[in-house]
Image (cartoon, helix red, strand yellow):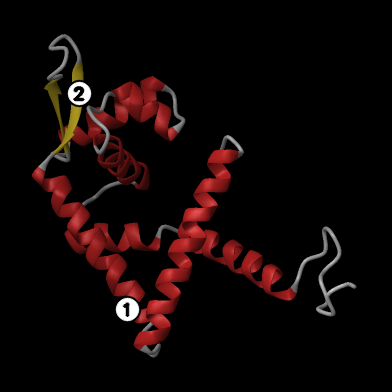
Amino acid sequence: MEDSVDKPAAGAETPDIATISESMVRMRMLTGRRIITRLAMDQLGIPLELTHADVIKTVKWIAKDGEVTVGAIAEMMRIDPSRSSRLVSELVERGMLRRAASQSDARRTVVELTEKAGDYFEAAERAKYDVIRAITADWSPEDIALFARLFERFITEYENVARARGK
């Protein structure tokens, strides 16, 4: 005997799935406008281009797993190595990055974040938390906790699906 709960036909979407999809589009549009990055740069008074901020974030991300090279930055950002090299040079001139000799191979040059870049990340975190606090200002602590758990779960599964599909 079939379950009496109505199940959508294969390929049909429930209203909740459609709402999640639409919300993802809206979030992508907001994220694409780079509101938090712009707020952080404004707070610090740092005259950076958005691409510079991307390079700084990329260096921080890659550094979690080891040394950062110009080539690794290019690969992660999916840009031409010569463009990556130019961006790194501009950020070195602005005091956000420094070049250093590799600890594993002194012939190689690696890229490191400076204290000024650390200040940028702190300002970015403050800006992000300020935005999140403003968004959730009238939410109950229970709603915030529930959203935090579900959003983390959603993003983790999103990453898993993307990895499984080779993206």
User: What residue appears at the point 12 percent right and 20 percent down from the top-left corner?
Assistant: 103
Q: Is 105 left, or right, of 164 in this rendering?
A: left
Q: Report whether residue 1 is seen.
A: yes
Above/below status of 2 relative to 100: below
User: What residue appears at the point 66 percent right and 72 percent down from the top-left corner?
Assistant: 19
Q: SS at mark 1?
A: helix
Name the residue carrying label 2: 110
User: What residue appears at the point 30 percent right and 44 percent down from the top-left corner?
Assistant: 57
Q: Nearest the camera: 30 or 2?
A: 2
Above/below status of 28 relative to 17: above
Q: Check the image and name the residue furthest to the front.
A: 1
Name the residue carrying label 1: 133
Marks 2 and 1 close (CB-CB < 8 Å): no
Q: Amino acid at mark 1?
A: Arg
Label 2: few (<14), some (14–19) or many (≥20) C-alpha neighbours in 10 Å: some
Q: SS at mark 2?
A: strand
Q: Amino acid at mark 2?
A: Val
Residue 154, given in percent of the width and then of the height, sits at 51, 61
User: What residue appears at the point 31 percent right and 46 percent down from the top-left corner?
Assistant: 53
User: In terms of image quadrants, where is residue 71?
Assistant: top left
Q: Check the image and name the residue furthest to the right.
A: 1
Q: Quadrant of the C terminus?
A: top right
Residue 41, given in percent of the width and then of the height, sits at 25, 57
Residue 141, given in percent of the width and then of the height, sits at 34, 86
Mark 2 to mark 1: distance in Å?
Answer: 37 Å
Q: Quadrant of the N terminus?
A: bottom right
Residue 48, given in percent of the width and then of the height, sits at 27, 47
Q: Is 51 left, or right, of 120 in this rendering?
A: right
